[in-house]
Image (cartoon, rainbow, N blue to C red):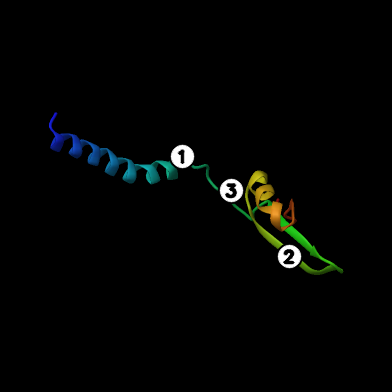
Amino acid sequence: MSAVTARATVLAVVVASTVLSPAMAARTAPPRPSGPPPFCISRGGGDGASGVYTDCRYYDYQSCIQAAIERGNCVRNINAR
């Protein structure tokens, strides 16, 4: 195999992996459930209910826990089923 052929083969593999990887990842990703996300990050204010921060965008508990480490507590979204 000549150096030119080897380079062309490597280039073809790199291009194919770059193009196919996002498409394959999109196909294998689990579908997102319909409706509001079931988990929120909640951080209450110092005086009870005022100043409550709620971030409801987490569809799985593990990602909510990871995000809540620095910002508050992971709680159930009362607007989700």
Mark 1: secondary structure: helix
Picture quadrant where residue 52 is located: bottom right
Badge 2 marks a residue whose secondary structure is strand
Q: Is residue 68 above or below residue 17?
A: below
Lower sequence index among marks 3 and 2: 3
> How far, Cα to Cα, is label 3 from label 2?
24 Å
Under mark 1, the amino acid is: Thr
Name the residue type under label 3: Pro
Residue occupying the far front of the picture: 3
Q: Position of residue 81 (x, y in %)?
A: 70, 50
Q: Nearer the viewer, mark 2 or mark 1?
A: 2
Q: Earlier in the sequence, mark 2 or mark 1?
A: 1
Q: Is residue 1 left or right of residue 65?
A: left
Residue 13 at least partly seen = yes
Contact (Cβ within 8 Å) of mark 3 with mark 2? no
Between the residue at mark 2 and the residue at mark 1, the CA separation in whole angstroms equals 34 Å
78 sits left or right of 1 in the view = right
**Would you identify the image quadrant in which residue 20 lies?**
top left
Which residue has dot 1 on it?
A: 28
Question: Callout 1: 10 Å neighbours few (<14), some, many (20+)?
Answer: few
Name the residue at 70% across, 53% down: 68
Residue under label 3, please give it. 33
Q: Which residue is mark 2?
A: 53
Q: Going from the N terminus, do you reach mark 1 or mark 3 first?
A: 1
- Contact between labelled residues 3 and 1, with CB atoms less than 8 Å apart: no
Q: Residue at x 69, y 48 (%)?
A: 65
Residue type (three-letter) at the residue carrying disc 2 = Tyr
- Name the quarter where the N terminus is drawn: top left
